[in-house]
Amino acid sequence: MDLITTADIDKTVEFLRTRTSVQLEIGMILGSGLGAIADAVDADEKIATGDIPGWPVSTVHGHAGRVVVGRLEDRSVFVLQGRAHFYEGHPISQIGLPIRVMYRLGVRILIVTNAAGAVNPDFEPGDLMLISDHINLLGMTGNNPLRGPNLDEFGPRFPDMGKAYDPALGMLAKGVALEEDIPLRKGVYVCVSGPSYETTAELRFLRTIGVDAVGMSTAPEVTVARHCGMQVLGISGISNKANLDGETETTHEEVLEAGKIITPRLKTLICGVLRRI
């Protein structure tokens, strides 16, 4: 069993402290096709994740695999321009390492984004969805990033996930969306393991249990963030209509293309939230 220890985390933290002295406030994770938002950061440092000891490196097209440290809307930010996924072969505990590193570096608010398929038939590609809650099917079936000995210095053995996504941050996002005339859906996100897209029967099952959007990330990161006591804002960019009728085909190219529509809206929303925090 591959587990991350405090020593592993601190080794990564020590490396990053040799590259930047910025006192960080806010962490961001940018999902598939959404990495261009990092270009808005007044960057002090840009670091390839492959150069960071212990860091899980993404192999997926549309994930730049870079950390950007700097300022955005006069807030100090630590931005993951792309993420690693469980389906790439990384141990689930390693997926949570970046969150714990952010925490060690001072981050207490995490903004997490993803590209997701619309299970709710009312949602359309290009929509933004405020994540009200999630169903972590990956974690519920045994792949929880907190598995193994508890790291007491980060949080309790049995963290509460009742308010995984911070209501106050959600209200800020809704206020910005209203002010900027950005349509903002709200719903439940489900994390599945991937990399295969869901069958029609699986999508019907997900709709039955109350899912609005489906993706292959986010929930493990949010679980670790809540274990650390971070406040979390989650936004899904709806990249495609889920194949509920069995008549359409979902492709990664479609997801990346939708990112071009989603990114300007998401950038406006995130920048507005940062100004209001």
Image: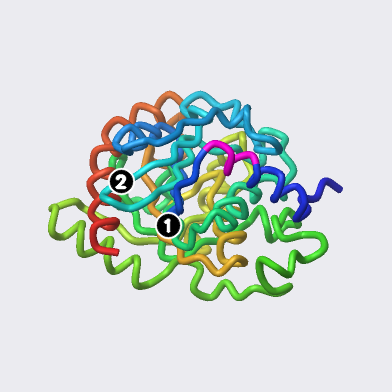
Callout 1: helix, strand or loop?
A: loop
Q: Residues within 10 Å of mark 2 (few under 14, many from 20)?
A: many
* x, y percent for residue 201: 57, 47
Which of the two discs, 2 and 1, labels the residue nearer the N terminus?
1
Q: Which mark is residue 25?
A: 1
Q: CA distance from mark 2 to mark 1?
A: 11 Å
Which amino acid lies under the numbered mark 2 shown in the image of this protein?
Answer: Leu
Q: Residues within 10 Å of mark 1 (few under 14, many from 20)?
A: some
**Which residue bears the numbered disc 2?**
72
| Nearest the eye: 155 or 251 | 155
The answer to whether 63 is drawn above or below residue 135 in the figure is above
Residue 266 is one of the magenta-drawn residues = no
* x, y percent for residue 206: 53, 55
Q: Is residue 240 left or right of residue 163?
A: left
Q: Which mark is residue 148?
A: none
Which of the 4 quarters of the picture holds residue 226?
Answer: bottom right
Callout 2: helix, strand or loop?
A: strand
Specify the segment rendered in magenta. 15-19
Q: What is the quadrant of the C terminus in the image?
A: bottom left
The answer to whether 32 is drawn above or below residue 173 in the figure is above
